[in-house]
Amino acid sequence: MLKSKKGQPFYKDFWFWVKILIFVVFLLFLVYPFYTLVVNSFFSTKAEGLTLYNFQRFFQKKYYYQALGNSLKISLIPTLISVLIGVPMAYLQTRFNIAAKTFWHVLIILSLMCPPFLGAYSWIILFGNAGLVTQFLTNLFGFQMPSIYGQGGICAVFTLKLFPYVYLYVSGAMGSIDRSVEECAENLGSGKLRRLITVTVPVVMPSIAAGALMVFMTALADYGTPGILAGGDFRTLPTLIYNEYLSETGGNANLASAISMIIVIISLLILFIQKAWVARKNYTMSALRPPQITEYHGIKRFWVTLPVALVALIAFIPQTVVVLCSFVKTNYSNFVFEEGFTFEHYAELGRSLTSQISNTFVYSTVAIIFILILGILMSYVIIRRRGKTGGALDMLMMAPYVIPGSVLGLCYIVAFNYLGRTPDGTVIKLTGTAAIIIISMIIRKMPYTVRSGSAYLLQMDPSVEEASINLGVSPMKTFIKVTARLMLPGVLSGAIISWVTCINELSTSIMLYTGKTMTITIAAYTNIVRNSVGTGAALASILTITSGVLLIIVFRASKGKVSFV
Amino acid sequence: MSHAVIVDHAVKTYGDFTAVNGISLTINPGEFFTLLGPSGCGKTTLLRMIAGFNTVDGGEIRFDDKVINNVPAHKRDIGMVFQNYAIFPHLNVAENVAYGLKARHVPKDQIPPRVEEALKMVQIDQLKTRKPNELSGGQQQRVALARAFVIEPSVLLMDEPLSNLDAKLRVQMRTTIKKLQRRLGITTVYVTHDQEEALAISDRIAVMNQGNIMQIGSPEEIYRKPANPFVANFIGVSNFVDCSARTEAGQAEVRLPGDYSIKIPVSRDYEGEVILSARPEQLFFDEKGIPGKINMSIFLGDFVQYEVELATGQVIELNEYTKDVDSIRADGESVHISMNPLQVSLYEKESKEVLSC
């Protein structure tokens, strides 16, 4: 029998094996692939042994280092604007009786949950060189729209798509400030605006920082939007990785690995800066009395509702446009819509894209089953059996934020392209299989489930489990009969969000797919890139509507309490 | 069949902090035994060690002569009542009570009658199909109780089971618990920080402080003969007066302020600084005694509580029963305080060990 350091027997209970299982999963599919990527970045076909050649090349050639600058620009600018939009939105929504408040809230959540490239795509439909609005303005007024392509367009799309992160974090925090804190400030002689600047905003600062971090990370990691809106030679790090590795002119996995390392390092740096900054100003507050909601009537109410409605509607335009376009006749040779209503695009899906559609649903469903099981177990370990292992798992959960999807895709390609040979000489590999796409979904999208599950578990009294054990039910059976059963509502709502993000996943699967394992997002993306607008729109509509329905279900079931970020 | 619970030099540490510091005690079969102490004294930690939710870092815990240190919690055959009831929120009352029986593979046809009987004992058999969120705190407590004893455990543990109930219900439930325990004869270990509750309910009490046992005894013993000033002050209220003593022939001559001295029977010879401990109701006004002045009086119905300031500046509390006197003394009145030497306690000042017998 093993002995712990205190001389007591160390019996390996159920949770010991669970921890082992979870660690093995993460070691195999996160730590090991990432390790191979790191190793890969220090090798080159152009130099012998360990070398910094890739990094030197990156920082010497403008073609490469320009992409770094671009990436930083298209991440920082949307982050700043998102804060400027998200914070006032949150303030209005939590402090005033906005008309149709929940409706705007749900619209904003929905706009966050679609793949970013859809935003890019619908802005092209509207404002592209041959876009509806562009043509309308040109024909009518001879007015020339500024180009949607390039840096400005990308920033606009990211901002509209990602400000909900700031909005959701901050409105959560603003809703839980105890009324007395603000009343106290008022009592001390602060006016409304002064109170907002000197008390409310500083108190929610950590949430603003958390939201801003999410915007930055997502923008930095996104492949689809710059992929569609790049125009000319505007490159970002994720598009560079894709091009370097998969370009037809002969890919270079070593250089792509080095670029991946650079993204990960930037993400880590930003993450640490944010953490260090927030650590100094973290306030815990228990809102015994939620903040007062100002009741306006008539024209005043209209004026506070208007900005919220406008922003929510603009943010929701991509989904609306995409669904509408899926029913409009298109002229394939041109990027032009003809007049008239049609189901043709959907018929086209039925003819040639059924496998993509079924792939999406099969992969995401399989992934979600694993996510559910692992997610429940992981939430439990992190909250109830924390120790060193629980803490380490909590750290690993941050990985998907730091490692962009396209980088994880590259990690998998590098690590699982060759696993050995069968006796008859065929190469055993994981790449190209459905399994690898499913695994990438599990690793990247599990955090939603774990976070939702652990938040739920944190509020559960541990003595309920002890009561069961005490009555003679083993810890494992107790977990199944009591704990898991009670955690289910929390875990399920998290799992649905994981599911929605799995369905909309693009950046990893675009690195890993083959003809047979193509999903809806990839098909939609490639169709859009190839200007098959109608088919792309129909595919995207399926994603949008499925996601919307699922999210509304979660929102309803959890009475709006689930965390979407 | 109930068992003896033997705690033999049990130790529990959290890092540098020793929560349970080598405690030894023997709980007899069928006994109602209470661990009493202020919060953080280690009483709940010890109870959870017996339950198997805390590891035993040193020493042994035995049920009769079987060492249970390494028996997992679910195999210890213990019933436990938790402070916040820990009712399974997804099961109704009957299912909650049946839970432990099912785990023990009690034949299916025997489960409903046993559940019924247990619920009758705690007088909630009419609530069988209710869900926990439809029950009051007192009703939930009864479910927790029924669920713990229906499995006929060899030992019953209760962790401050009444602390979440209102005062009236608390008194009512403690009577219910005591009667039930008598009737079932299960060895019971009860944890509380409420000394009145402990006195009311227990056969024996272990008073704990900072991971150590300060005294074990019947409620009467620990009240009448506290083994040290801590117990004297934790159980009830005690006045402590520093003074000096000298023993002769089993009698200590204690020199009190104001040239007043009394003789207290002691168990051993001692000469030096001592602490005299006397409860407010053990003191009375007399012709002779320690001189003082009444600061304030509080009329509490059945007794009057006086605050008497001695010449040394020390304030002494003295209770006088309303039925024994005709009037309340005025503030500022000069008085003399005396006591029955057979009732008060005497401790060595340095070691805090008891001298009086």
Image (tube, grey):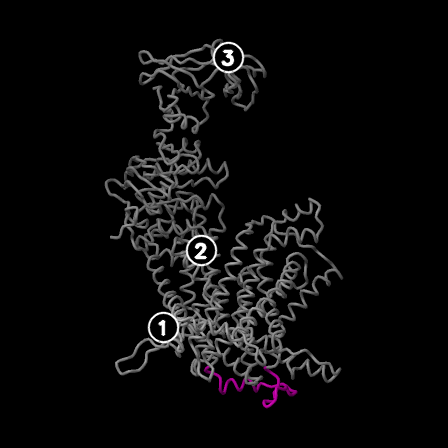
Residue B90 - label: 2
Q: The residue tagged with tag 1: helix, strand or loop?
A: loop
Give the spatial CA distance, label 3 vs label 2.
Answer: 66 Å
Indicate whether A116 appears above or below B192: below
Magenta residues, start to end: A326-355
In front: B299, or B6?
B6
Residue A415 got which mark?
Answer: none
Mark closest to the chain's N terminus, 3 or 2: 2
Residue type pointed to by label 2: His
Q: Which residue is mark 3?
A: B291
Determine whether A469 is above or below B295 in the image.
below
Q: Which residue is mark 1?
A: A49
The residue lying toward the viewer, choosing from A69 and B196, is A69
Name the outermost residue toward the bottom: A333
For mark 2, does the 10 Å Cα neighbourhood hold few (<14), some (14 to 19), or many (20 or more) residues?
Answer: some
In the image, which is nearer the foreground, mark 3 or mark 2?
Answer: 3
Side of A290 where A273 appears, left or right: left
Q: Are marks 3 and 2 in contact (CB under 8 Å)?
A: no
Question: To which chain does the residue with label 3 belong?
Answer: B
> Where in the figure is residue B191, as x and y percent of width and height?
39, 38
**What amino acid is at disc 1?**
Gly
CA gap between label 1 and label 2 equals 62 Å
Judging from the image, mark 1 belongs to the subunit labelled A
Amino acid type, callout 3: Pro
Mark 3 and mark 1: Cα distance apart in space: 96 Å
Point out residue B94 in the picture as x, y percentages from the top left corner.
41, 51
The residue under the point 59% across, 80% down is A231
Secondary structure at badge 2 equals loop
Q: Counting other residues with Cα less than 10 Å from the Cα at mark 3, is it few (<14), some (14-19), or many (20 or more)? A: many
Q: Is residue A342 magenta?
A: yes
